[in-house]
Image (spheres, rainbow, N blue to C red):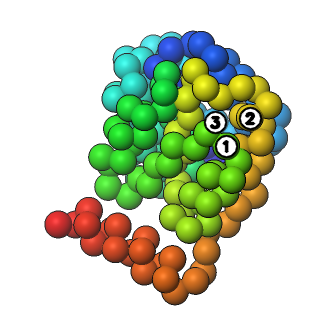
Amino acid sequence: MLISVSADELTGIAGLLVDELQRRGHETVAHGALAGDERPDWAWASESVARDVADGRAAQGIVCCWTGTGASMAANKVAGARAALCLDAATAAGARRWNDANVLALSLRATSQAELAEILDAWLATEPSADADDLANVEHLREIERR
């Protein structure tokens, strides 16, 4: 799977993220500080990832900043991106299952290497729900975007 990734600085798990995804057999496209030739700021880097996902250039996205909050906010401004800030595996699985989240937001400060592995395990293994209520909620998000 092609996964678009960004970080606004090379600290914490930023250096591990691309290596971990590639070790798992995924291709990556890097933005922000991970790319080296792009503006690294969280708003710009996260927007680039979200546009890759929303425009179909990547199947999933992962955005990182110090807390993960700004990165998730920026990604969620792009129509078609559904970013979820996940600090643990259970939240990551729930975001994929119930919200059909397609952009994972991570905290560079609060995510350890072990937590990164657990979060990625849950995120990548969980499929979106086919339950009518869950599908209706995701469709409502699309309606909100169109307004």
The kind of residue on which mark 1 rests is: Asp
Q: Position of residue 25 (x, y in %)?
A: 80, 42
Q: Which residue is mark 2?
A: 115
- Determine whether the residue tagged by mark 2 lies in a helix, strand or loop: helix
The vertical placement of 70 against 139, above or below, is: above
Q: Nearer the viewer, residue 124 or 113?
A: 113
Q: Residue at x 76, y 26 (%)?
A: 113
Disc 2 packing (10 Å; few <14; some 14–19; many ≥20): some
| Cα–Cα gap, marks 1 and 3 | 22 Å
Q: Nearer the viewer, residue 47 or 131?
A: 131
* Mark before the other along the chain sequence, 2 or 1: 1
Q: Where is residue 123 shown, x and y percent of the image?
A: 68, 52
Q: Quick check: 139 above or below 87?
A: below
Q: Earlier in the sequence, mark 1 or mark 3?
A: 3
Q: Residue at x 70, y 61 (%)?
A: 126
Circle number at residue 28: 3
Front-lying residue, 3 or 141: 141
Residue under circle 1?
88
